[in-house]
Amino acid sequence: MTTTVSPPPERAPGRPRRRRRTTDRGLNRAFRWVAVGAGVLILAVLAAVAVFLLQQAWPALTAGSDELAASVPRYPDDTSLLEYVGPLVFGTLLAAALALALATPVAMGIALFISHYAPRRLAQVLGYLVDLLAAVPSVIYGLWGIFVLGPAALPVWEWLGSWLGWFPLFAGPVSPTSRVLATVAVVLAVMILPIITAVAREVFLQTPKLHEEAALALGATRWEMVRTAVLPFGRSGVISAAMLGLGRALGETMAVLMILSPGFLYSFKILDSAQQQTIAAYIALDFPEASGLAVNTLIATGLVLFVITLAVNMGARAIVARRKEFSGAN
Amino acid sequence: MSTTTVPDPADATARTRAALTGADGARRRKDRTMTVLIWGAFVVAMAPLVSLVWTVLSNGAGRISMDFLTLSMRNIFGGDPSGGIYHAIAGTLIITALATVISVPVGLLAAIYLVEYGKGALARAVTFFVDVMTGIPSIVAGLFAVSLFTLILGPGVRMGIIGAVALSVLMIPVVVRSCEEMLKLVPHELREASYALGVPKWLTIVKVVLRTSVAGLTTGILLAVARVIGETAPLLVTVGVTDSINFDPFEGRMMTLPVFAYRQYSQGLATCPGGESASCVADIAIQNAWGAALVLIVLVLALNLIGRLVNRWFSPKLR
Amino acid sequence: MAQRIDVKDLNIYYGDFLAVQDVSMTIDPKSVTAFIGPSGCGKSTFLRTLNRMHEVIPGARVEGTVEMEGVDLYGDDIDPVAVRRNVGMVFQRPNPFPTMSIRDNVLAGVKLNNHRISRSDADELVESSLRGANLWNEVKDRLERPGSSLSGGQQQRLCIARAIAVRPQVLLMDEPCSALDPISTLAIEDLIGELKQDYTIVIVTHNMQQAARVSDRTAFFNIAGTGKPGRLIEMNETSTIFSTPAEQATEDYVSGRFG
């Protein structure tokens, strides 16, 4: 800015020159702009994701249902794109919600274990171990779910089906293959444990010592201390942690693709096969063979997934950000 | 023990003892139950990890051999047990390296921007959207890369660079996050000491800040690589599959380890007309999948371990 | 209600580090005992052993006995949770639970006990505890507001109300006025004078004038140097400590020559 306009040379000596911004010259300036550029680039990439997806999805969004039925395999006649995506959205939400319901209590337990129960020296190592769960590639979770968890869980699913079959989720028949949403939900729950644990752990560790000691000095047991001081303090943090986990579960592809025997129904039966399918697994299954309008249709469903996860993640981050302001004010 | 305030000291002692031994069994039972549950939660989380690592080891170890690591699957059909994952290892390393080359400069510079320059609305927006970006489903990142390259090269193109771009979308926010944490750990006094010597800001960042945190940055980058090296879905839609070796990420399909594992798994059992023999193994595809999974998990665990160790051994002791 | 405490040959450790060495003293019931001494002399550490709060810090342990009416607080059959119910504590910085209302803060300790307390009993307890802490008139119209909405001095009195609501035998105060302004400090000191009719009170203070104003007996702790353990130098009637102490170090400290 200032370097482009050189100061007038006839300025009398001894007169104060206009102060140059010494922090903003030459390489300094170039370096700063490169750094800013990287930040802007990230925003641009996110915008580009949305724009390009929309651009490639557009032909499918504007096509008539006859056109879609003609060129997209397994596209039923007389169905709008929305009706077509509906069961997929339902399956995605159901799988993610089940995974979340399973993972959240366990993740809170692990977070409390690491922050308040485990011996100090062990706590960090145990944290690494939990983080390792996040590092395992999803394709390996898929193999494990199919060959280990599925057979192991089958007796449990049969027991649930025969004793709790009156409950809509567990309504029979129970598939003998175990390639059902219940198995998928357990695998997804394991996969999202680390992220929920990591966020909840951070929040629990931030509980002011003052409040913990206040509870203990009143004669609280360790659990009562946790309940009076730690959990109320960490509540919003736990909510956002759970939402981040939900975001992960919504977008997980391979474990669902490999384990689930898909169906396109609005069905709550999680012990029967060929009932539900999730958006991500659907795309991964059909995309390699798709061409023409079918690609656009798949990208359109991907756009729906993007919007859902974006909303969930932004909600979670907004809660975290608000909490930061609160704790900063105190 | 004599006291002046209570007439009968023995009575007072008994009452105090009763008060201090905590007769409230229900509360203590609850406390103990919760302790057991919380320890139990940890055990529940460790069970899958142990089971998973053990399964991969025991199922995959038998398939690992020199041939398996150095041959491709070219001209291998049915239950033929020769052939290997060389092409997939090469593809994974090339694509991951490309993604790293794209992500690290962008991520590191963005982290520098946030820590050293970031102020106001732009910095807040970058922070927020980096967080949001960490939540992009991997399949959506793949679709984005496909859309981008469809615009440039037309539909139906599959090649390694598209996969690298998709992985970069997933990797950049992870790099930004971890680098940001590491740069924040550099004490402000070091920067001021450098300014006081008349060193300009950009040199201070390069020579002082980055040099101080280089171990932590390396750790962060290695962990980010570990995160994307096992990604399957985005590569499935961008890079496709092949049975041959392809070292050129700008030309044609490539195989990668996770996609290979999935591909082999989904092929299921082979038919052996003359019964099983040395040249026809019915479940060879499943065995291949486990073998690839083992190599993949070893890569991931090694990256994690090296990352942690780098940080532990080489990070300077601040304060 | 109030009870006496006998401490015999108490050593306090953090891991291998001996923080306080060889303390023996008797704390009289229904009186105020003040602990004074320079920073780091172990007076707060010692105070926290009287209700086993020091165990909260990992690695902390004690040798010796702390007896309350002849019962060793560190005996095998003693529950630290029950000890803390009987020996209440007020901290240096006021620490009402931020997520609870004023009323719930007062009831926090009682509600832990799971016993269903009827609404009228709870109201009564809130009022009597807040009256006991000289806070009732200031907050009776806003009991449902959060505890953090009060001023610092009011928050500290709320913490005292919370501590006495569980009806302890002994009340420990760890520099309760060090974060407060002079007017709030006076209010707390007046309150201490009233509370000693019912409770055994032990107060740690940096402020020698405060010790002289509120306490009946005073114990002086000192430390020989960095890394050395803190020790009890002498303990006597407050008037004696501040006029004719037996030890030179005590006289140096109370006359302001060091610390």
Image: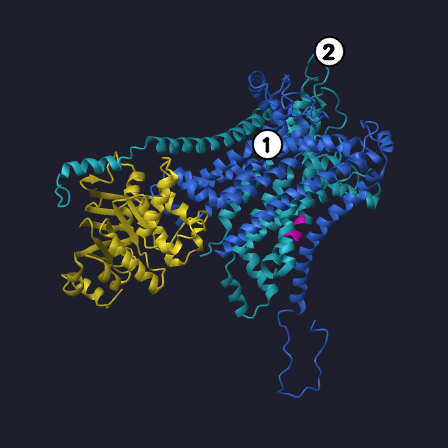
Q: What residue is pinned by disc 1?
A: A99
Residue B183 % position (x, y)? 55, 55
Q: Residue furthest top?
A: B274
Task: Please tell me whether mark 2 or mark 1 is closer to you in this view.
Answer: 1
In-image side of C203 versus A185 (left or right)? left
Q: Chain of mark 2?
A: B
CB contact under 8 Å: marks 2 and 1 = no
Tell me what hue chain C is rendered in.
yellow
All told, the count of numbered labels is 2
Secondary structure type for disc 2: loop
Q: What residue is pinned by disc 2?
A: B274
Marker disc for residue A219: none
Q: Which residues are magenta?
A: B103-108
Q: Chain of mark 1?
A: A
- The image quarter containing residue C184 is bottom left
Tell me how far mark 2 sits from mark 1, CA to CA.
45 Å
Amino acid bearing label 1: Ala
Q: Nearer the viewer, residue C47 or A179?
A: C47
Tell me what hue chain A is rendered in.
blue
Quadrant location of the N terminus of chain C in the rendered image: top left
Amino acid bearing label 2: Gly
Reply yes or no: does residue C111 show up in magenta: no
Tell me if I can see residue B52 in this picture: yes
Query: Chain coloured cyan: which letter?
Result: B
Secondary structure type for disc 1: helix
Q: Residue at x 63, y 28 (%)?
A: A142
